[in-house]
Amino acid sequence: MPIATPEAYNEMLDRAKAGKFAYPAINVTSTQTLHAALRGFAEAESDGIVQISTGGAEFLGGQHNKDMVTGAVALAEFAHIVAAKYDITVALHTDHCPKDKLDGYVRPLIAVSAERVARGENPLFQSHMWDGSAETLADNLAIGQELLAQAAAAKIILEVEITPTGGEEDGVTHEINDELYTTVADAVRTAEALGLGEKGRYLLAASFGNVHGVYKPGNVVLRPELLADLQAEIGKKYGKQDPFDFVFHGGSGSTEQEILTALENGVVKMNLDTDTQYAFTRPVVDHVFRNYDGVLKVDGEVGKKNTYDPRTWGKLAEAGMAHRVTEAAQQLRSAGKRMK
């Protein structure tokens, strides 16, 4: 199936870990951006991950009610239908969910998948993220234990963020400072609380200077080599080689060498949102500037329907974002490696 089964998702992650590549995880906020992500993966011959943040889900729920669960479920159901036309395997994921939104987002979505699994079906989403980086590590991991057990029972993989990513993501803000680096002690406590797979599989968003959003070169100091230290120290303690499946947050704007170092050290998923937002919007702006008197009814004129028709500029937006997704697959070395 184009939407990954639990078994296929595990295989995707195993293949990435063994092959030292990662899947682009593309945030979407509409059926159009979903198609752009799917098209980009398909054109790169890459499997991938499509994800919906709390803000994206609220937007998808419509501005009348702004219901996150409705928005996420609706797009996931839509994805299960349209993804069948793409010759790739895709996992559906929910992005950053802080503590105050768990009851309105992740917990109800896990319940939806639990009901599906109880009926002999596959979960609606293949993974969910718990972002406890604003909490103490003790509280973060306690909630993580609870969610991991629920996710595992519903055949879902959990993603956890144990230390902050800088910048702002859907209202969750962290300063850019020395706290943006996960320590070995943080990783030990994580392994003690969540296990290393025996309690359920999880993805680990460890911090190595990551920052969400837009930043200029030099403003952020990424240290992806830190991930190798975490793998080595925890691996030695538990007798397991490369025990963590890492996630690279704040991937937009990273250098090629930073990305390659992260891949060598166990990153299997890299989030992209800022870059793909720009890639979607830029062709629309270009179209408007070039067709100003067509998209607007200037000086009493009637404009040109074929220029303000949303399909006209929407196709350009989809193509622009799809191209950036294909670029990401090439950078992350997942291009040409789709599962047959």
Image (cartoon, rainbow, N blue to C red):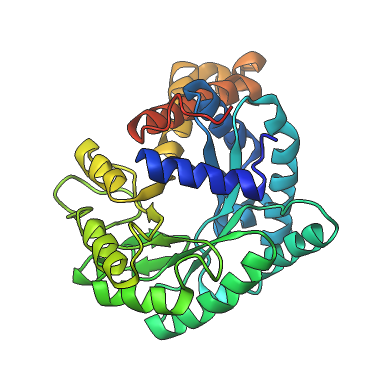
Picture quadrant of residue 29? top right
Q: Is residue 314 above or below residue 291?
A: below
Picture quadrant of residue 173? bottom left
Quarter of the picture containing the N terminus is top right
Foreground of the two, 267 or 162? 267
Residue at image point 20% right, 68% down: 177
Foreground of the two, 12 or 178? 12
Q: Is residue 303 above or below residue 82?
A: above
Percent across and percent down for residue 34 are: 60, 37
Task: Give the farthest residue toward the left.
Answer: 218
Task: Report if residue 29 is visible in the image.
Answer: no
Residue 28 appears left or right of 79 = left
Residue 133 appears left or right of 255 = right
Percent across and percent down for residue 24 are: 44, 40
Q: Is residue 276 above or below residue 124?
A: above
Residue at image point 45% right, 84% down: 139
Task: Give the farthest residue toward the right.
Answer: 119
Task: Report if residue 260 is visible in the image.
Answer: yes
Percent across and percent down for residue 151 are: 63, 66
Percent across and percent down for residue 84 are: 71, 30
Residue 314 appears left or right of 179 = right
